[in-house]
Amino acid sequence: MKNNEMQMGIIYAGFSYFLWGLLPIYWKLVQHVSADEILANRIFWSFFFMLAVLLFTKKWGAFIQTLIHFRSNKKQLAALVVASLFVSCNWFIYIWAVNSGHLIEASLGYYINPLVSVILGMIVFREKLSLTQYASFGMALIGVLILTISYGQFPWISIFLALSFGLYGLVKKMVTVDSAIGLTLETLVVAPFALIYMIILFVNGSHSFLAVSTGTDLLLIGAGAATAVPLLYFAKGAQRIPMSTLGFLQFIAPTLTLILGVFIYHEHFSSIHLISFLFIWTAISIYSLTKTKLFTQLEAKWKKGKSVGI
């Protein structure tokens, strides 16, 4: 993997996690709308936003060619469908958690998620970690375990969020298509179901879209862009960097989410949380150092010296 590709992958993925970390602010603005209706609008408007992106970037022809290609490549098609299902489940659980007062448990899910990504990378792609990286992984695991145990009960929301997004990231690495085209296809798979559900809500008179206020309507439509932009950057990053690196970058989002929960939405932050953060941030710092050129040079000299000593 080329260094410039690796660097761009880290930038893309890091930016996507930064946006995801701030996303609870958006969902709080529409918390008066049910989570299922928010999800339906999120999927539906994401699809139309991505169609606009394809037209603007002149990728419509490539999109049609990819559709034709998938007709003869059943494995890629199956992976795309599975990816769309995983991310849709993740969206629903996260929206419900944020708007139901479970922001801390949601952030815990995205602290567990990197560990899931690292494990999947090791199992599926045979990615190897150095001894120092194993140490950082262990420290992050301790931090997550402290958070989990201190929560007092089995964190179902956290586990489902971690598994659904970890598996989504895994499947995304198996779908070798342009990120914008891939996301358009993912939303295309579930958009018809979202539209049907929105129609049912209209028929039953239980809809919020076009019924509450213009501000609510604009926010629900804007959910398409709020969803698609970070996913686009995530897809660009996921295809360029190892799962292990992707896993550790994911700590950005839950950290921002917890900061929002504590300082903006005034959720309780205990000494246990502080201890957990210290473990997790130390792990991130150690892992980040292992990716620097200086560390690589020092490690190479150490190995060379050890070999000569033998």
Image (cartoon, grey):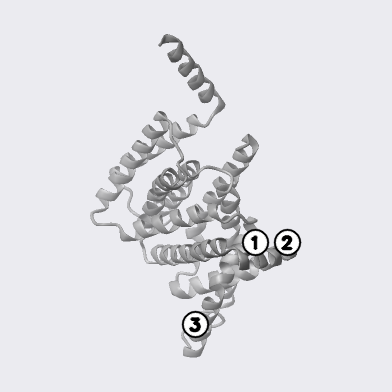
Residue under pointer 1: 181
- Of label 1 and label 3, which has the lower sequence position? 1
- Answer yes or no: do the residues labelled 2 and 1 have beta carbons within 8 Å? yes
Residue 59's tag is 2
Local secondary structure at mark 1 = helix
Looking at the picture, which amino acid does disc 2 mark? Lys
Q: Position of residue 295 (x, y in %)?
A: 51, 24
1 vs 3, front mark: 1
Q: Residue at x 46, y 85 (%)?
A: 206
Circle 1 residues within 10 Å: few <14, some 14–19, many ≥20: many
Q: CA distance from mark 2 to mark 3?
A: 34 Å
Residue under numbered circle 3: 207
Q: Residues within 10 Å of mark 2 (few under 14, many from 20)?
A: some
- 135 w.r.t. 64: above or below: above
Q: Secondary structure at mark 3?
A: loop
Report whether 102 appears left or right of 166.
Answer: left
Task: From this view, report whether residue 280 is shown above or below residue 204.
Answer: above
